[in-house]
């Protein structure tokens, strides 16, 4: 007899350890996964996604959404019973469900639940604030009041949820529970009682007693079932004494046939693959800096020594993790002189503006009063491609002379 609950405990312990330890793992000097509020950056396993490129996160969200639909079509609510953080954390407070407890035991249970709630709330904060900065500020007494209140509020909400709601969340509040019925089909993996073996049922109600959401699986499939398999294990223990297998099983729909290559599954898989490919492409082609050329409104085009001068504002925003130094060049003309303050260095998360003066020989504008050119910003990092920005170079407007007779 395979004890499914041993596997569930292994999975939930792994998920809990990953949830708590992930913020402490650093890659390139930053958390492996954290949204940094001050800089509006998402640190994602060694890469940084700035708020300007947050559409990548939107695409990734679509990918995760359709992946969830795909998993549900194939394996039902396996996420709820095995991987959902809420279910995992509720299982860690299993002692609170014991019916016969003395007053002291109840007090200890509440204290333990509150302690677990505090750990969870602080860990959630670590996905927004570096845990190393958190403990440093806490020890120095300089912890932000916003961070402190966030911890307090999340701790209170988590504690009340564990004490008052528990598995009722899965059957009443959880939107996934309400939507999963439209994702199921006749071949989706479910937990079901085998009617063909109903005569073997001894009415021990072990499956009902162990069900976390209070269902009787013998009455048929109910949308509130979270596919945890506890009823399977409970029935197997009872039937083992009768030398019979469990009357409750994981089955692929009531046809009991595994058909992964179904039309709806294939369509969802294709959409999931499209969003995943789009996410990978966007992440790979994200520009590490932004470059823009704007006319200097305080400087009108003018002539000097057979050359025409235009002035521009060069704006560069560094959205990489390293300080960059840029070299600016002009494309579209060979005979030019570009003057700007050097070195043009920009620190991470910094936006720098420089005033530039461009000199071009007057002869080049003899036939055309306006030239369409491009400026190219090239960083000192050879792996980064230059970024171009289009601009116009104008000949000064001369006042018309009045014709007198």
Image (tube, helix red, strand yellow):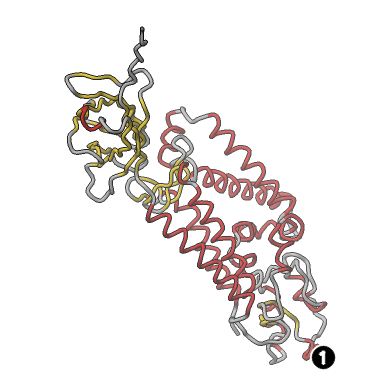
Specify the quadrant that holds the N terminus.
Answer: bottom right
Can residue 237 be seen?
A: no
Compare residues 104 and 196 and report the one nearer the observer: 196
Residue at point 30% right, 33% down? 368
- Residue 133: x %, y % from top left: 41, 37
Asked if residue 255 is positioned above or below residue 383 in the image, the reply reads below
87 left or right, relative to 385: right
Residue at point 71% right, 50% down? 163
Farthest-out residue, front: 405
SS label for mark 1: helix
Asked if residue 48 is positioned above or below residue 397 in the image, the reply reads below
Compare residues 154 and 208 and report the one nearer the observer: 154
Compare residues 185 and 209 and report the one nearer the observer: 185
Q: How many marks?
A: 1
Instruction: Check disc 1: other Cα within 10 Å, few if <14, some if 14-19, many if 20+.
Output: few
Residue at point 71% right, 87% down? 255
140 left or right, relative to 384: right
Specify the quadrant that holds the C terminus.
Answer: top left
Can residue 322 be seen?
A: yes
Asked if residue 215 is positioned above or below residue 49 in the image, the reply reads below
Q: Which residue is mark 1?
A: 199
329 left or right, relative to 190: left
- Residue 196: x %, y % from top left: 78, 91
- Residue 131: x %, y % from top left: 44, 42
Q: Quadrant of residue 137?
A: top left
Compare residues 313 and 17 and report the one nearer the observer: 313
- Residue 348: x %, y % from top left: 33, 37
């Amino acid at each position: 007899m395979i004890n499914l609950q041993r596997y569930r405990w292994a999975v939930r312990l792994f998920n809990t350890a990953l949830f708590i330890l992930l913020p402490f793992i650093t890659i390139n000097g930053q958390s492996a996964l954290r949204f940094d509020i001050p800089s509006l950056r998402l640190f994602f396993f060694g890469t940084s996604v700035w708020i300007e490129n947050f559409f990548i996160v939107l695409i990734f969200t679509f990918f995760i959404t359709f992946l969830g639909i795909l998993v549900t079509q194939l394996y039902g609510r396996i996420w709820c019973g095995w991987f959902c953080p809420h279910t995992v954390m509720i299982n860690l407070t299993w002692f609170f469900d014991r019916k016969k407890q003395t007053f002291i035991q109840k007090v200890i249970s509440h204290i333990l639940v509150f302690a677990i709630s505090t750990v969870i709330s602080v860990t959630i904060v670590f996905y927004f604030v570096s845990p190393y900065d958190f403990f440093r500020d806490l020890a120095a007494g300089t912890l932000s009041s916003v961070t402190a209140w966030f911890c307090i509020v999340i701790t209170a909400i988590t504690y009340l949820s564990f004490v008052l709601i528990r598995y009722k969340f899965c059957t009443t509040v959880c939107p996934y529970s309400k939507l999963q019925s439209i994702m199921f089909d006749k071949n989706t993996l479910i937990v079901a009682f085998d009617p063909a073996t109903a005569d073997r049922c001894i009415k021990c109600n072990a499956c009902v007693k162990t069900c976390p959401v209070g269902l009787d699986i013998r009455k048929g499939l109910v949308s509130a079932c979270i596919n945890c398999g506890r009823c399977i294990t409970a029935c197997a223990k009872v039937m083992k004494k009768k030398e019979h297998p469990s009357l409750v099983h994981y089955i692929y729909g009531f046809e009991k046939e595994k058909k992964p290559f179904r039309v709806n599954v294939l369509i969802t898989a294709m959409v999931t693959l499209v969003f995943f490919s789009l996410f990978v492409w966007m992440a790979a082609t994200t520009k590490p800096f932004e470059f823009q050329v704007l006319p200097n409104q305080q400087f009108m085009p003018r002539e000097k020594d057979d050359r025409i001068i235009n002035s521009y504002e060069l704006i560069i925003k560094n959205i990489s993790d390293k300080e960059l130094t840029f070299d600016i060049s002009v494309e579209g003309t060979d005979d030019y002189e570009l003057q700007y303050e050097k070195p043009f260095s920009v620190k991470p998360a910094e936006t720098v503006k420089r005033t530039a003066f461009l000199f071009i020989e007057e002869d080049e504008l003899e036939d055309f009063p306006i030239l369409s050119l491009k400026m190219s910003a090239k960083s000192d990092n050879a792996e980064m491609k230059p970024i171009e920005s289009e601009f116009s170079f104008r000949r000064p407007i001369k006042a018309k002379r009045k014709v007198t007779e």
